[in-house]
Each structure stands twice: as C-alpha cells, then as structure tokens.
Image (cartoon, rainbow, N blue to C red):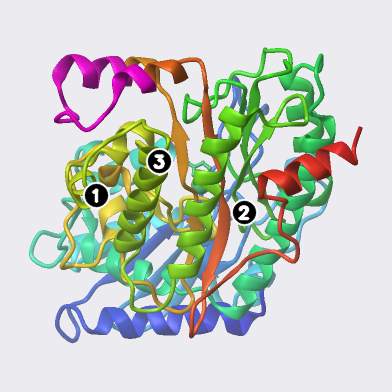
Amino acid sequence: MFSKETYTGRRARLLEAMRATGRDGERGIAVFPGNAEAPQNYRGNDYKFRQESSFLYFWGIDEPGFAAILDLDSGEETVYGNDVDIDDIIWMGPQPSVASKGALAGVDRTAPYTAFHDAVRQARSKGRPVHFLPASRYYNTMMLSGLMECPPENIGRTASVYGTSGTAASLELTRAVISLRLIKEPCEIEEIDKACEIGYLMHTAARQACKPGVREQDIVGRMEGVTISKGWGVSFTTILSQNGETLHNHLHHQIITPGRMLLIDAGAESNTHYASDFTRTLPCSGKFTPKQRDIYDIVADCNELAFQLAAPGIPYREVHLAVAAKMLDGLKSLGLVNGHIDDMVKEGIAGLFMPHGLGHNMGIDVHDMEDLGENLVGYDDDQTRSPQLGLGSLRMARRLRPGHVITDEPGIYFIPALIGKWKAEGTDKGMVNYAAVEKYLDFGGIRLEDDLLVTDDGCRRLGPHRLPISADDVEAAMAGEQ
Ligand code: GLY
Ligand code: MN
C-alpha cells in the first residue's frame, strides 16, 4: 500500500472533479465495490485474488469482500467490510480489523459489508444519483444489477447519471476516474519501474532457455517463475509461440526449432499490482536468417521511431501513423508493397502487416482502464476511432501528456488467412505485391515492445534495464548464453 496521504489525495481530487458535474446537494454518492473471491470450480478453491483496480487506486485495501462509498455532497467516506470471526481465524489466521485497514487508507468510518447494500438502497429511495463504474467481473455486475434494479448489460455501459439514476454506469464518474488514473504519480512510476525490472528478468530467463529441442511450455514456466518469485505474477496471460503471426497465441506445445523465431510477449505485475509488458522476438537457432533480419530491422526501426516521436502534445495516433509510414517504406524497399507511402498509409495498407495498434495505456492494468471503456480511456473528445484494420485497433490515440504510461509495440506479421482475404477481395487497391508476400506465408511474425513514460520534454523507457533489441545485440546475447 502507498501512504495514506496518497489515497486521501486521490479521493480529494476525485471529489473535486465530480464537483464540476451535477448541482450542489444533488450529486449523490459514488460507490466502489471491491472484488469478491472468484471460485475456479467450487467455493474454497478460488482463483488467486486480484482486487478491482479502481477500488485499489482510491481505497488501497487489497482484500476480497470490501466496498466503499464517497458521498459527493457531504464528502463523507465509508469503507465496508466484515471483521473476521472464529471460522475465518481457523482457516486464514488472525486478521487486522476493518477499522485498522480503513485507517491505512485514511478513512475513519467503517461499517459491515451489508451496510453497503443498505446505503445504496437508501440513496436510491431518496432519489439521490448513484454513480458506479462499469463492472468487468460477473459477481459485481450481478450485485450492482440487483441493487440498481437494472439489467446486467447496463452495468457495463456508461451514460450520464443525472436524471437517469440507476440505468447505467456513471459517465461522469468514469470520466473523472480516467482523468486521474491516466496521469501517473511518482509513486506509481516507481512501481511500474519495478514491474519492468521483473519483466526484464523474465525475458532474460526466457532468452536463456530458448534453445533448439526445448518445449515452449518449459520456457513459459521458467519465465513465469521469475515473476511469481519476485512479484505478484504475470500482468496478463503469457503470449509465447513460434507462430508469432497469431497475435495472442497462448498455445505453448511446440518444440523450439532452428530456423524459426520465437515471439515472447509477457510482463510482470508487481506486488502493488502495477504492470509491465514487453515483447521480444528471438531467432530459435541464435541467429536470424537474412530474410528474418530484413523484417526484424524494419520493426526495430519502427519501435525506435515511436520512442523518438513520443512527447507531450503529439497525439499517439500520429505516432502510429508515422510508424505505419516507416513500416511501409521498409516493406516497399523489400518489394512487398508498391505505391506512394502517403497513399498506402491513407488506404490502411499497413493493417495487412500490423493489424493491431501501436500501443495502449499501462498502469494498474496492463491495458489500463479498458474496463472503463476503450474509447473513453484512449481517445480525446475530438478524436474518433477509425474503422480501418490496424488503426481501428489503436487503443491509445490521445495527445500525449507528461505522466502518461504507454506501450510502443510495432509488429509485422504474415497471416496467411488475412493475406488470402485481401487478395481475394482486392482490399489493397493494387498496392500489395502478392507474388512477393506469398513467399512469406511461413514466416510467422515479429513484435518488439517497450514501455514508455511521457516526460516534460519527450519520453523515457521504463525499467532500469532495456532488453537487447537490435538484431546484433539479440544474437550477441544469445551467443553468450550458449
Ligand atoms: N501484451 C499484450 C497486449 O498488449 O495486448
Ligand atoms: Mn502490450
């Protein structure tokens, strides 16, 4: 947990932001249900507990069965939770009181969990607005649906609360929370740096284990062991495969084979629940083939370009488009596409090779706050999301500001089904040289990802060490690990 002033400060800023909405005396309450335990199969055999991220951000308590209310009119703060009884002590050992947990977050008022339900019902019966954030877990979705007497699907969508109390998650609260969480505080950056260091060690262990004959799953185990021993665990399900053209490939059954490449996209979650997210693509034999190196160098140049461009004031959407232009220029020099770079960018030709966006926000969640709404989190009010393949998947398009934490993750993939579809449908408008591209149908994919903090005059890569990224440095590291 951070200092109690961290949490009281965050709530004070939230109250301030909410004061800009609604009318005095009529703003109602903001409710924050923490996560409950989630059974894997039966009660008592739960998934490892992970607190709801906004609850964690504002109230700090990292345990199941808590909720909190911030009264937007009086400023009163209450934490709800149950003190342990003798049964709990038998199974879990003695636990600090709810009051002492509240005190660590700077909250004086605590009450049993059932009083949370009573407080929400009472506010509703008085016609006071009840603000809640879109829920992602089913338990909270169903609990809020019952309390708010609205269909579960309304709990995941946002609308203005004023005048429509109880029909959906609060757009006002969601916007206010996003505005705070998007700009990371120094104590958060310290934690993200720690998560990045664990991520560095994970990838180092993976690279050392990547040798012909080894099973992919073995590498996953060694890598995840690093973060389990140093942090909370992985920040998302590990992506590790020689079929890197499948963007989120969670199958690890293959044997490392010379001549192929291994794409590893994995990160750590620190004990305070801050994420890292790195991707490297390794030559399985320790050396890239000339064909692999040509594509690899383009992706590495794109990663570097994004780092050079990311600075306050520039929309990350523009950085994505600059990367698309650089990528197309490189692919053109290899004869895979033809046409004016500007025309190809406009027509979204880069989407055939990079059907995802350049990056996303990162913080307590690896894709930070996407549960609150991808567009609300990643787009300024005057930006609209493109329908184009690739650009349309861009999750962070906003004008960059100091304190933003984002990923820089260009990639080039040869996805046979997508190439076949574009060819059949003429999507490329004559700009793709299919005869050349079809020579890459068994190539796989390359992605290279670093995590960036936007600073006052540019950006810095997060974490005390950077994983080798140039083809030469990757080969040298692997040679030293034989
Ligand atoms: N690292 C996985 C992703 O960004 O989607
Ligand atoms: Mn990522």
Q: Which residue is at 49% across, 85% downward?
A: 456
Q: Position of residue 321 (x, y in %)?
A: 30, 55
Sequence-earlier tag: 2 or 1:
1
Q: Which residue is at 33% across, 17% downward?
A: 435
> For mark 3, does the 10 Å Cα neighbourhood hold few (<14), some (14 to 19), or many (20 or more) residues?
few
Q: Which amino acid, by three-letter code, is at mark 1?
A: Met
Q: Position of residue 60 (x, y in %)?
A: 59, 66
Q: Position of residue 115 (x, y in %)?
A: 44, 59
User: Does residue 90 appear in the picture of this structure?
Assistant: no
Horizontally, residue 266 falls left or right of residue 350, namely: right
User: Does residue 93 appear in the picture of this structure?
Assistant: yes
> For mark 1, does the 10 Å Cα neighbourhood hold few (<14), some (14 to 19), or many (20 or more) residues?
many
Separation of residues labelled 2 and 1 (CA atoms): 36 Å
The mark lying in front, picked from 3 and 2, is: 3
Sequence-earlier tag: 3 or 2:
2
Residue 425 image-quadrant placement: top left
Task: Label 3: state its secondary structure.
Answer: helix
On screen, residue 216 above or below 16: above
Q: Which residue is at 19% across, 43% downward?
A: 150
Residue highlighted by disc 3: 333
Horizontally, residue 124 falls left or right of residue 42, namely: left
Residue highlighted by disc 2: 276
Residue highlighted by disc 1: 148
On screen, residue 264 above or below 61: above
Horizontally, residue 43 falls left or right of residue 72, namely: right
| The magenta segment | 419-436
- Does the magenta segment cover residue 430? yes
